[in-house]
Image (cartoon, rainbow, N blue to C red):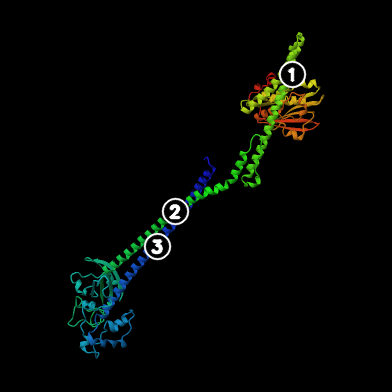
């Protein structure tokens, strides 16, 4: 984006919405899981409560069944009217029977029989028992409920399983007695079961009841065969069976209402969970939207305030021109993030100022370097044209013109070489070569100059040292260094050119016994148009470009160059080139062409 403010607000808003969206999704999922667990727990609780209430209703029904059957047994043979009060006297002498509520049943509820030789009147002892329909009609413990009076029935069986008596609603459809229960049941042992009879679902309680009353007057119904079971009282069997049955429709209706209540509660719980999650989603969307709008509005204001120092820095930079390279702003007034920028910008401006100064000086130096040979050339030509001269005189003047032209050509070639380096059109072309042979060729080119000043030039190197490098550039580097060593050396001095193979590099040293270089000049020695000794400008052909070319060529060959010098004691240039091993074909080792270098 073109605007930093817009970029920052967009990035910050995207990051905020991403984080807020992630938090919202996490909060929503956590809440959804929590509500789901709560819903599952609530459903489980409602289901457990329904099962408990269902179990309680079944137990209540069984309890009522057993209670009604017990009441029927109590009143089955109870005398009518005032005669029933005579039954209370046997309470004093009757033995206790360990059958729970039968203690009362023996003396009162079941109507304990009187001995035949007792003083009780015969009409009391021979009181007729009431029918099962009459006994059920007298029951008021279990009245009609909210679903109406429940359907109920009762029947009794003899000890051998034959029907003894039944209510009128079972006249056409009597219920059979379970033969297994008849044989295995204990006295007053109840058994509950449910079954379908006709179109009704019934619940039944079966009891094995001890029979203590005499047989009814007139003989009454007796077991088949007329045989009286042993242990009976007054010739009857010692026990009989009673079944009390009730319709479970009221219970089913109550259970249906419970199920409806349970389902309604579960549906309401699910609806509450869905509503809560929907409200949470709406609130989260509203929160994200409100946050986005707030950030969008407030972000521009805050970012504009935060970028105010950058605006001040931009204004300070805009006031820089070619005449004033000073950054007019106090770095201490800037935030810590902009202080390094201001410092580096000030340093760059200082370097730019120095570069402009060097360019101005270079222009002056180039003008001076070109003006001197041009002036000499022009003067020589003017002198030659003033009058007629001999052939020897013309030849001498032409040679002087040739020297001036060579100086101008040398300067132009160096400028062109630097221009090619800057444009990247003069790359290194590595090929197999012998460094020792290149060093000897460079020394041979400079040796005449050294001999003219009685300077000793020696080369110390192994017999051969193969290397992969650019032979032309390496030879020009050595020629420039040796030429400088001659020009800045004292008469009758010495120059040592050393080639040595290290572990992973080839080291070349050029050591002279010249005037040396001051410490402050060594830092700028490889800058263009820089002269360590400007006073020698008049008597040397150098223009301050040779070492700049040397440094550029060494960098192109992935090498390094450094200088070590002491004023008045001499200078040492050290070149290190990476050693990549001998070439695959030793016969391919080549040396530079001295004529190429001179060109």
Read off the residue under disc 1: 376
In the image, residue 428 above or below residue 240: above
Task: From the top left corner, tell me how far across and down residue 371 is, in percent.
Answer: 72, 22
Q: Could you tell me which residue is drawn at 18 percent across and 70 percent down? A: 172
| Mark 2 lies on residue | 286
Asked whether disc 3 touches disc 1, contact meaning CB atoms under 8 Å apart, the reply is: no
Q: Quadrant of residue 248?
A: bottom left
Q: Position of residue 202 (x, y in %)?
A: 26, 68
The C terminus appears in which quarter of the rendering?
top right
Q: Is residue 404 left or right of residue 493?
A: left
Q: Which residue lies under the disc numbered 3?
A: 42
Per the model, the C-alpha gap separating discs 3 and 1 is 113 Å
Q: Confirm or deny contact between disc 2 and disc 1 (CB under 8 A).
A: no
Horizontal and vertical percent for residue 132? 22, 77
N-terminal label among 3 and 1: 3
**Residue in view at x 33 percent, y 71 percent:** 59
Front residue of this view, candidates 176 and 311: 311
Q: Which is closer to the viewer, label 3 or label 1? A: 1
Label 2 crowd (10 A; few <14 / some 14-19 / many >=20) = few
Q: Report whether residue 49 is seen.
A: yes
Q: Residue at x 35, y 60 (%)?
A: 267
- Disc 3 secondary structure class: helix
- Furthest-left residue in this view: 218
Q: Is residue 539 left or right of residue 79?
A: right
């Amino acid at each position: 984006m073109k605007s930093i403010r817009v970029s920052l607000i967009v990035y910050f808003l995207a990051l905020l919405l991403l984080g807020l969206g992630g938090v919202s999704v996490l909060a929503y999922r956590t809440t959804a899981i929590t509500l789901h667990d709560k819903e599952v727990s609530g459903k489980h609780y409602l289901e457990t409560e329904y099962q408990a209430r269902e179990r309680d209703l079944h137990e209540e029904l069984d309890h009522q069944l057993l209670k009604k059957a017990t009441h029927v047994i109590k009143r089955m043979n109870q005398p009518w009217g005032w005669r029933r009060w005579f039954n209370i006297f046997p309470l004093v002498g009757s033995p206790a029977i360990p059958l729970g509520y039968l203690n009362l049943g023996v003396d009162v509820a079941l109507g304990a029989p009187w001995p035949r030789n007792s003083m009780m009147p015969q009409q009391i002892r021979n009181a007729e028992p009431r029918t099962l329909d009459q006994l059920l009609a007298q029951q008021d413990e279990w009245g009609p409920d909210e679903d109406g009076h429940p359907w109920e029935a009762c029947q009794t069986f003899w000890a051998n399983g034959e029907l003894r008596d039944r209510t009128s609603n079972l006249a056409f459809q009597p219920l059979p007695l379970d033969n297994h229960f008849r044989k295995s049941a204990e006295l007053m042992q109840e058994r509950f079961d449910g079954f379908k009879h006709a179109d009704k679902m019934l619940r039944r309680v079966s009891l094995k009841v001890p029979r203590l009353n005499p047989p009814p007057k007139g003989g009454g119904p007796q077991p088949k065969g007329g045989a009286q079971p042993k242990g009976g009282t007054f010739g009857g069997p010692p026990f009989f069976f009673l079944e009390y049955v009730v319709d479970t429709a009221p219970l089913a209706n109550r259970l249906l209402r419970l199920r409806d209540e349970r389902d309604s509660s579960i549906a309401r719980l699910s609806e509450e969970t869905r509503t809560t999650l929907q409200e949470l989603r709406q609130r989260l969307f509203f929160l994200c939207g409100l946050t986005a709008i707030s950030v969008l509005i407030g972000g521009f204001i805050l970012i504009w305030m935060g970028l105010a120092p950058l605006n001040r820095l931009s204004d300070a930079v805009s006031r820089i021109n070619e005449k004033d390279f000073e950054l007019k702003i106090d770095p201490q007034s800037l935030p810590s993030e902009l202080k390094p920028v201001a410092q580096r910008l000030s340093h760059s401006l200082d370097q730019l100022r120095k570069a402009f100064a060097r360019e101005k000086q270079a222009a002056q130096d180039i003008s001076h370097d070109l003006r001197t040979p041009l002036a000499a050339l022009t003067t020589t030509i003017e002198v030659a044209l003033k009058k007629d001269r001999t052939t020897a005189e013309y030849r001498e003047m032409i040679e002087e013109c040739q020297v001036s032209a060579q100086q101008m050509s040398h300067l132009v070639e160096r400028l062109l070489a630097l221009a090619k380096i800057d444009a990247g059109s003069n790359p290194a072309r590595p090929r197999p070569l012998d460094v020792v042979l290149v060093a000897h060729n460079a020394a041979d080119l400079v040796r005449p100059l050294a001999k003219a000043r009685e300077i000793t030039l020696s080369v110390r190197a192994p017999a051969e040292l193969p290397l992969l490098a650019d032979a032309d550039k390496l030879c020009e580097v050595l020629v420039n260094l040796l030429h400088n060593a001659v020009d800045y050396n004292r008469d009758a001095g010495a120059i040592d050119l050393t080639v040595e193979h290290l572990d992973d590099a080839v080291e070349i040293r050029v050591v002279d016994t010249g005037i040396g270089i001051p410490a402050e000049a060594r830092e700028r020695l490889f800058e263009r148009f820089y002269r360590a000794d400007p006073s020698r400008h008049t008597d040397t052909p150098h223009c301050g470009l040779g070492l700049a070319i040397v440094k550029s060529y060494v960098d192109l060959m992935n090498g390094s160059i450094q200088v070590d010098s002491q004023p008045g004691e001499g200078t040492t240039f050290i070149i290190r080139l990476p050693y990549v091993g001998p070439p695959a074909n030793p016969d391919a080792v080549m040396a530079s062409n001295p004529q190429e270098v001179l060109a």
